[in-house]
């Protein structure tokens, strides 16, 4: 499994490419996992092989632990328990309560563009495996009556109204990236890349230089990238786009980012949104929210946030990005 990092591209994931160690000859080990419906890859630099394997095993345990807490497709998870609680207060782990609170705080920040109670709509559209489906207006109207983060009640546990459900798909990978970063740092790792689908978290400095170089994939073509970003260690780069998960029916495309106000896939003038910051959990939720908000609202939001950098790719191909991450 050992590889000499002589090639430029070290990590290729569906959305982002990460470049590192070019010609420096540093040693790295990578391990790929599949969890939360996502291909995940962790790369550690300048570790012994045995140590790298220990680290991968620790990471995998953490991935499984979180999947078993947060996944809607694990029957015994806290979230499944909550979604089946029929209007009663459900006892869930304090960590689950915290993540739901964090999700609600992003809902408040984004005027409800991010809303984990979209679950009934996501389910109608068939995005939890099984058959994709175009629901009729009546079904959407029914689902909408159950969508609204303000109806999540914190009782020590969590209470949802009967018929409501939550889905942490828009924030859980961000949380996992932050957790894996802390875990690797605690274990003395000086340099690593955590790639969870459209989320990349950079741990420490790149072995041969201070900042990392991350390429944002074009939302219009799998094989091209839109730009390269210069990103410091400890930061996370998260992208959301309509082309990540979608299906086609009668010549129309339906994607998986739902506008909580309509119950339909968000009609956005953005093709993809990339958010860069230190809080991966926030960046993940915001990339989804800003996509729903569209260009004008997203820019207005971002202009007030010194802690975040961004790349917005418009449907027409125009790219608007913050100067500080330009390579
Ligand atoms: P991905 O998980 O594919 O990287 P996102 O981070 O943008 O993409 O999250 C999209 C997922 O979040 C959807 O698959 C769904 O589970 C959930 N979701 C969809 N729309 C919203 C929304 N408006 N607010 C919160 N979560 C959403
Ligand atoms: Mg997200």
Image: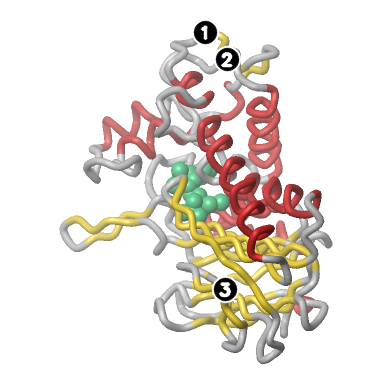
Q: Are circles 1 and 2 on residues that touch, CB within 8 Å? A: yes
Q: Distance of mark 2 from mark 3, alpha carbons?
A: 49 Å
User: What's the distance in space between the residues labelled 1 and 3, CA to CA?
Assistant: 52 Å
Question: Please, is residue 82 above or below residue 277 in the view?
Answer: above
- Identify the residue position indicated by label 1 in the image: 88
SS type, badge 3: loop
Instruction: Locate the C terminus and report the quarter of the image it occupies.
Output: bottom right
> Is residue 58 visible to us here?
yes
Picture residue at 74% right of the left edge, 73% below the top: 231
Q: How many marks?
A: 3
* Outermost residue toward the top in this view: 88
The reply to whether dot 1 and dot 3 touch (C-beta < 8 Å) is no
Question: Which residue is label 2 attached to?
Answer: 159
Q: Residue at x 41, y 48 (%)?
A: 37
Q: Position of residue 232 (x, y in %)?
A: 79, 70
Mark 2 or mark 3: name the one nearer the start of the chain. 3
Rendered residue at 64%/39% (across/down): 107
Across and down, in percent, residue 58 comes to 64, 46
- Element under disc 2: strand
Measured in 3D between alpha carbons, the distance from the residue under mark 1 to the one under mark 2, in whole angstroms, is 6 Å
How packed mark 3 is, by other alpha carbons closer than 10 Å (few <14, some 14-19, many 20 or more), is few
Mark sitting earlier along the chain (1/3): 3
Local secondary structure at mark 1: loop
What residue sits right under mark 3 in the picture?
2
Discs 1/3, front = 3
- Residue 150 at x, y = what percent? 61, 26
Ligand 1 within 8 angstroms of badge 2 C-beta: no
In the image, 70 versus 247, the foreground residue is 70
Q: Residue at x 69, y 61 (%)?
A: 236
- The residue at the far bottom in this view is 23
Residue 291 shown left or right of residue 304 in the figure: left
């Amino acid at each position: 499994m050992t590889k000499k990092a002589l090639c430029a591209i070290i990590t290729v994931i569906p959305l982002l490419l990460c470049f590192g160690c070019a010609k420096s000859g540093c040693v790295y080990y990578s391990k790929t996992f599949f969890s939360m419906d996502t291909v995940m890859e962790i790369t550690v630099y300048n570790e012994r092989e045995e140590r790298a394997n220990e680290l991968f095993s620790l990471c995998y345990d953490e991935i499984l632990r979180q999947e078993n807490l947060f996944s809607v497709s694990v029957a015994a998870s806290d979230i499944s328990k909550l979604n089946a609680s029929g209007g009663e207060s459900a006892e869930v782990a304090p960590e689950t309560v915290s993540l739901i609170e964090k999700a609600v705080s992003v809902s408040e920040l984004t005027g409800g563009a991010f809303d984990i109670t979209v679950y009934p709509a996501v389910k109608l559209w068939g995005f939890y495996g099984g058959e994709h489906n175009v629901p009729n207006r009546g079904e959407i109207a029914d689902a909408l009556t159950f969508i609204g983060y303000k109806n999540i009640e914190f009782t020590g546990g969590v209470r949802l109204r009967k018929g409501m459900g939550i889905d942490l798909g828009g924030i859980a990978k961000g949380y996992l990236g932050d957790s894996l970063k802390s875990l690797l740092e605690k274990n003395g790792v000086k340099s690593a890349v955590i790639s969870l689908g459209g989320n990349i978290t950079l741990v420490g400095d790149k072995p041969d230089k201070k900042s990392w170089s991350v390429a944002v994939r074009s939302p219009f073509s799998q094989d091209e990238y839109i730009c390269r970003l210069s990103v410091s260690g400890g930061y996370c780069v998260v992208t959301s786009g309509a082309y990540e998960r979608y299906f086609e029916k009668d010549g129309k495309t339906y994607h998986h980012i739902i506008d909580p106000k309509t119950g339909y896939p968000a009609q956005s003038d953005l093709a993809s949104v990339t958010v860069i910051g230190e809080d991966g959990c926030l960046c993940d939720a915001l990339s989804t929210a800003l996509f729903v908000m569209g260009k004008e609202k997203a820019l207005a939001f971002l202009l007030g946030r010194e802690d975040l950098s961004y790349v917005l790719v418009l449907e027409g191909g125009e790219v608007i990005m913050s100067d500080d991450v330009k390579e």
